[in-house]
Amino acid sequence: MNIYVGNLPYNVTEEELRGVFAEYGDVDSVNLISDKFSGQSKGFAFVEMGKNSEADAAIKGLNGKALAGRSITVNQAKPRASRPSRPGGGGGRY
């Protein structure tokens, strides 16, 4: 199950996040989202856990809990909505 983790402290690392979720079961992956230009954390991540029962326990156990002084949001990640293609794109003739 893919889990969304929000309101993270900007200095949290993937290893720290993995350790927090590992208390509830096996963590397949951690993807801490960062700004592509500055490299600064955007304050949210996605954690993938293989067993739904362990993921559910992590969601129930961690949602609203404090992590480095911030109350984190933890819930099941929603699939990305497909974006309609945008017309245009430049490079056209004038």
Image (spheres, rainbow, N blue to C red):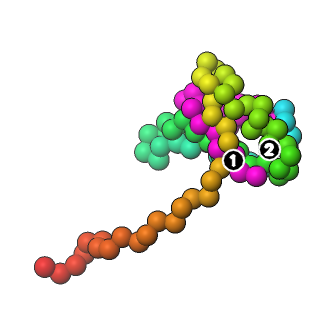
Q: Judge from the rendering whether residue 39 lies leftward or rightward of residue 74; answer left or right.
A: left
Q: Amino acid at mark 1?
A: Gln
Question: Within the magenta stretch, is there residue 68?
Answer: no
Sequence-wise, which precedes: disc 2 or disc 1? 2
**What is the residue that sits farthest to the top in this orientation?**
69
> Horizontal and vertical percent for residue 29?
74, 48
Q: Residue at x 73, y 31 (%)?
A: 62
Specify few, some or many for label 1: CA neighbours under 10 Å numbering under 14, 14-19, or 20 or more. Answer: some
**Proximity of marks 2 and 1: CB atoms separated by less than 8 Å:** yes
Q: Judge from the rendering whether residue 7 lies leftward or rightward of residue 58; answer left or right.
A: left
Label 2 and label 1: CA atoms lie apart by 8 Å
> Horizontal and vertical percent for residue 9?
57, 27
Numbered badge on residue 7: none
- Pick whichever, 16 or 81, lies toward us: 81
Q: Residue at x 69, y 32 (%)?
A: 63
**What is the residue that sits farthest to the bottom in this orientation?**
93
Q: Amino acid at mark 2?
A: Ala
Q: Residue at x 65, y 50 (%)?
A: 77
The residue that label 1 is drawn on is 76
Q: Which residues are magenta?
A: 1-22
> Horizontal and vertical percent for residue 76?
69, 47
Numbered badge on residue 55: 2
Specify few, some or many for label 2: CA neighbours under 10 Å numbering under 14, 14-19, or 20 or more. Answer: many
Residue 67 visible, this orientation: no
SS label for mark 2: helix
**In the image, residue 89 above or below residue 43:** below
Question: Within the magenta stretch, is there residue 7?
Answer: yes
Q: Residue at x 63, y 30 (%)?
A: 72
SS label for mark 1: strand
Q: Quadrant of residue 44?
A: top right
**In the image, residue 65 above or below residue 75:** above
